[in-house]
């Protein structure tokens, strides 16, 4: 398949997981906003139309290039201070939601428009209704038992059919409260009490004090040299450092990136260090060992998240991801807020990433950004452990001379639970099998291969690209 066309504009560009989100971002730019305003506007719409992937009860990770400096915003939260265990479902799987404060923190630092204007499109969609996508309806039907158990039995998504207009007036009120009063409307008072109550009803220990004490780290990204440019990733507790580790191994010559089999072996070696993500830049100094005996083992099978990438005429670029982790997160519903809560505590594993009350688990969200003296490009994709793998393939293809649009469109593989999943139009299926990989061939475009959003600026101005996978879209103005 030929690459999707790179789209250029004058004011800016937006690439996102939904056309409605793209439209909100473009509207923010047209109203005098910048790339940060556009990113938040698009993310907010995603919380309305893609609740299986993201929401007010979830998280956001952003990389912001203001034209001079790249900064990482860590909009994730910690496990409850009073928690005794971490689960993958229900109240014990919930960590403090980070998205609302990530919005206010990012907006106050870089935004041009007041938050009430930035969130207006999302509020209107929630009030007036948006057409239900087939993907969201299918996810709601698949997770119906969990959602009912979590208190969402009366939620409009459980009775929606594809194309139905889904109105969410309570969610509109929640978004409106944040638009009017900032994140304090969410982390204290009635909303905080409602969140704590929903968690308690479903076996968790998240308390109002956990929400009140939440803070959003704003940090320096991890940056590595790559093929004449610099690649920036989120610092811990994002596992973006694993992408930096893989790129550095190729750049230094300790691993080859010449074939899919080479990269699969590299991913196998890199993911043996997933529990060591907290080491950050120090991890890059450690020798990268050999791949596991079974190529492709290590990465796990999680999926849902949604991406937003934006750029504006002044050189500001944002790479971001929003997520509730699994489909509908923990499935714990907050009826007073109209949203479900994340199950990010399911990200705790062992070693340095073992569960500890009040700590953040290693986070799969791993947006990336590349910079040169004359350009900045934001790249992000859903797919949990597949995020690092997809971005590695895209960056290697660009290094090898492919255009950015072709690199995004090209067939992909994904290591998952000891297998190597491969799109059926990939030209290296036989080679992967010959190297001992347990290959599973899937239809091209399967959700498990991610959905890259891309936006940036270069000497010719803002540009964007949208993957052909899932429902991604892009537009420039």
Image (spheres, rainbow, N blue to C red):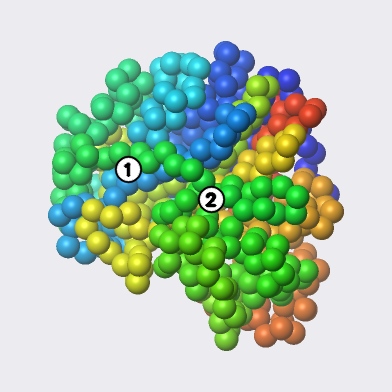
Number of marks in picture: 2
| Quarter containing the C terminus | top right
The nearer-to-camera label among 1 and 2 is: 2
| Residue 275 location (% of width, % of height) | 42, 67
| Apparent side of residue 334 relative to residue 156 in the rendered image (left or right) | left
Label disc, if present, on residue 222 of the rendered structure: 2
When asked about the image quadrant of residue 204, the answer is bottom left
When asked about the image quadrant of residue 391, the answer is bottom right
Is there a contact, CB below 8 Å, between mark 1 and mark 2?
no
**Whole-number angstrom distance, CA of label 1 to CA of label 2:** 24 Å
Q: Secondary structure at mark 2?
A: strand
Q: Secondary structure at mark 1?
A: loop
Q: Nearer the viewer, residue 30 or 150?
A: 30
The residue that disc 1 covers is: 97
| Apparent side of residue 184 relative to residue 454 in the rendered image (left or right) | left
Label disc, if present, on residue 220 of the rendered structure: none
| Residue 245 location (% of width, % of height) | 58, 63
Q: Looking at the image, which residue is at 67% across and 85% down?
A: 436
Q: Earlier in the sequence, mark 1 or mark 2?
A: 1
Q: Nearer the viewer, residue 462 or 69?
A: 69
| Residue 304 location (% of width, % of height) | 48, 52
Asked if residue 179 shows in the view, the reply is: yes
Q: Looking at the image, which residue is at 75% across and 74% down?
A: 429
Q: Looking at the image, which residue is at 57% across and 29% down?
A: 66
Position of residue 178 relative to residue 360, above or below, is: above
Q: Nearer the viewer, residue 385 or 1?
A: 385
């Amino acid at each position: 398949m030929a690459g999707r066309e790179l789209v250029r504009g004058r004011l800016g560009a937006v690439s996102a997981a939904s056309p409605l989100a793209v439209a909100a971002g473009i509207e923010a730019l047209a109203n005098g906003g910048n790339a940060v305003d556009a990113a938040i506007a698009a993310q907010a719409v995603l919380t309305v139309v893609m609740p299986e992937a993201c929401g007010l009860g979830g998280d956001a990770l952003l990389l912001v290039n203001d034209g001079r400096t790249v900064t990482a915003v860590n909009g994730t939260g910690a496990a409850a201070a009073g928690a005794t265990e971490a689960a993958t479902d229900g109240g014990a799987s919930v960590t403090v939601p980070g998205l609302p404060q990530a919005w206010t923190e990012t907006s106050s630092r870089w935004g041009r428009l007041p938050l009430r204007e930035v969130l207006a499109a999302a509020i209107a969609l929630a009030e007036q209704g948006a057409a239900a996508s087939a993907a969201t309806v299918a996810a709601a039907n698949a997770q119906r038992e969990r959602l009912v158990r979590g208190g969402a039995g009366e939620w409009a998504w459980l009775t929606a059919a594809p194309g139905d207009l889904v109105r969410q007036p309570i969610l509109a009120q929640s978004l409106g409260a944040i638009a009017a009063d900032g994140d304090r409307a969410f982390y204290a008072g009635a909303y905080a009490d409602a969140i704590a109550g929903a968690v308690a009803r479903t076996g968790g220990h998240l308390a109002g004090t956990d929400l009140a004490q939440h803070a959003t780290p704003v940090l320096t990204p991890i940056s590595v040299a790559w093929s004449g440019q610099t690649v920036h990733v989120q610092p811990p507790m994002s596992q973006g450092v694993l992408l930096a580790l893989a790129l550095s191994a190729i750049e230094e010559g300790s691993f080859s990136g010449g074939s899919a089999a080479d990269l699969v072996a590299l991913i196998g070696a890199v993911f043996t260090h997933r529990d060591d993500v907290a080491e950050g830049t120090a991890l890059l100094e450690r020798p990268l060992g050999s791949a596991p005996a079974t190529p492709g083992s290590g990465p796990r099978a999680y999926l849902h998240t949604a991406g937003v990438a934006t750029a504006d005429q002044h050189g500001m670029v944002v790479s971001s991801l929003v997520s509730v982790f699994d489909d509908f997160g923990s499935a714990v519903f907050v009826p007073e807020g109209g949203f479900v809560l994340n199950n990010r505590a399911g990200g705790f594993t062992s070693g340095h990433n073992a569960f500890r009350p009040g700590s953040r688990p290693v986070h799969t969200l791993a947006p990336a950004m590349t910079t040169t003296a004359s350009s900045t490009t934001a790249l992000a994709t859903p797919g949990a452990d597949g995020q690092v793998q997809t971005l590695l393939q895209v960056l290697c293809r660009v290094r090898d001379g492919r255009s950015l649009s072709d690199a995004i469109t090209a067939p992909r593989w994904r290591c998952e639970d000891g297998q190597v999943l491969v799109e059926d139009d990939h030209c290296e299926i036989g080679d992967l099998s010959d190297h001992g990989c347990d290959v599973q061939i899937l239809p091209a475009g399967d959700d498990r291969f991610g959905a890259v959003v891309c936006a940036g600026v270069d000497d010719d101005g803002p540009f964007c690209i949208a993957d052909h996978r899932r429902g991604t879209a892009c537009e420039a103005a």
